[in-house]
Amino acid sequence: MPNSSAERNEYDVAVIGAGPAGLAAAAAAADTGVSVALVDSGPRPGGQYWRHRTGDDGTHHHDWAEFTRLRARIREVDHLAEHAVWHIEPGFTVHATGRDPVRARRLVLAPGAHDRQLPFPGWTLPGVYTAGGVQALLKGHGVLAGKRIVVAGTGPFLLAVAAGLLDAGAGVAGVFEAGTPAGFARHPLAVAGALGKLGEGAGYLRVVGRRYRTRTMVIAAHGTGELSGVTVAKVDANWQVVPGTERDVACDALAVGYGFTPQLELPLQLGCATRLDADGSLVATADDRQMSTVEGVFLAGEVCGVGGSALAVTEGLIAGRHAAGVSAGSRLLRRRRAQRRFAGALHQAFPLRRGWLDRVGADTVVCRCEEVRHRAVTAAVDDLGATDPRTVKLLARPGMGLCQGRVCGFATACVVADRLGRTLIEADLRGLAARPVAQPVTLGELAG
């Protein structure tokens, strides 16, 4: 295993994040002979995608062989585990919890993403989880979130979560996809270049079987003190409920997810430019070398746009080599183009539709940390004259709580833009994503 207790503090390259992108970047940089630090908050490499327990043989993990290959390649890397990066100074000085600062000539940022949530009546009940949270419980701890679980939202990740639950012996009461995979038919070139991904999805679909329902959404969760069931309904192409199709499904856990939100705190701290991606996410801008708009700062994985583990690995390999001062080569660039093309097709096949906003009632909680309801957000626009989400945050407090807007930021921005009668723009999300402290840190560490 790589060194996890290194005492040195200066490196040629520092890689932040040990998921697929970060592991690949660290391996690629180390292969060139430069000194590399891999800094991550987790106890083991792998990130969320390859989250695992000690002694895990990979039986319930996809692409486990890729993980073991990358893990073997980072033996010369100083793996600084269980150190969450909370601030990076220009230059680059990396401040992480529980250790002295790390200094590096160049950076590769691969912080990953977290589940994107859309509020609906009852979503704050105990028993309602993010889809990634349910998967993390299973992979990281071998714990099932419930005995009878509903999986809902949009995107192929739902199939992976449901198949993993079934494989572990859970009861899955239904998998409700708000969109439909039929949209892939409009992108034959992208599909032809990623037949392996389609095969992966088909395998999950075989496991899930008739539980999978398209154009169907969970529109409310119910329970007294904890989740006891959900209401699902058929929806049209804009996610408007088809009248008369509502029905109740009993369950004790709900895994819900509407894609992912890239973690941009560190790129924004360093002044990296951003843009709005095809799926509505705010992402950091990278060139063909995976370098950001800040010299010496390279980006890889979901921070550049959500596209799956294979693309993250490819971007990590490119970023790692260029951070070490070595060209990536045309083969990796061709692979990245094909994988990015498929990611674009994926976003267009499973888009977010405006209809979800119509089911957010005045009393629906939008920000669960501060218990800010929809009526308070709209009142900040209608009565107090707010014209952007950042001002709404200051007036009504959504995003002011423990998560600092990571959970509610996207939804708040959507509600505000819709109330103002316009579409979401980059500035809406950027104003809620910038945080001077990227991770929770003690006052003692700040004082130090």
Image (cartoon, rainbow, N blue to C red):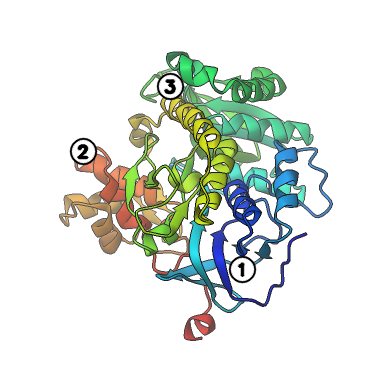
Quadrant of res 345: top left
Nearer the camera: disc 3 or disc 2: 2
**Of marks 1 and 3, which one's residue comes earlier in the chain?**
1
> Of 405 and 184, which appears nearest the observer?
184
Location of mark 2 (residue): 422
Tell me the kind of residue under disc 1. His
Q: Which percent across, then down, holds residue 262?
A: 46, 48
Nearer the camera: disc 1 or disc 2: 1
Tell me the kind of residue under disc 2. Arg
Q: Estimate how packed mark 3 is, as few (under 14), some (14 to 19) or many (20 or more) residues with alpha carbons within 10 Å.
A: many
Nearer the camera: disc 1 or disc 3: 1
Judge left or right: residue 304 versus residue 389.
right
Judge left or right: residue 204 versus residue 234.
right
Mark-to-mark CA distance, 1 and 2: 41 Å
Q: Is residue 442 above or below residue 79?
A: below
> Of 156 and 371, which appears nearest the observer?
156
Tell me the kind of residue under disc 3. Val
Numbered disc 3: secondary structure: loop
> Of 373 and 68, which appears nearest the observer?
68
Residue shown at the point (53%, 84%) measured from the top left: 444
Q: Is residue 109 visible?
A: yes
Location of mark 3 (residue): 235
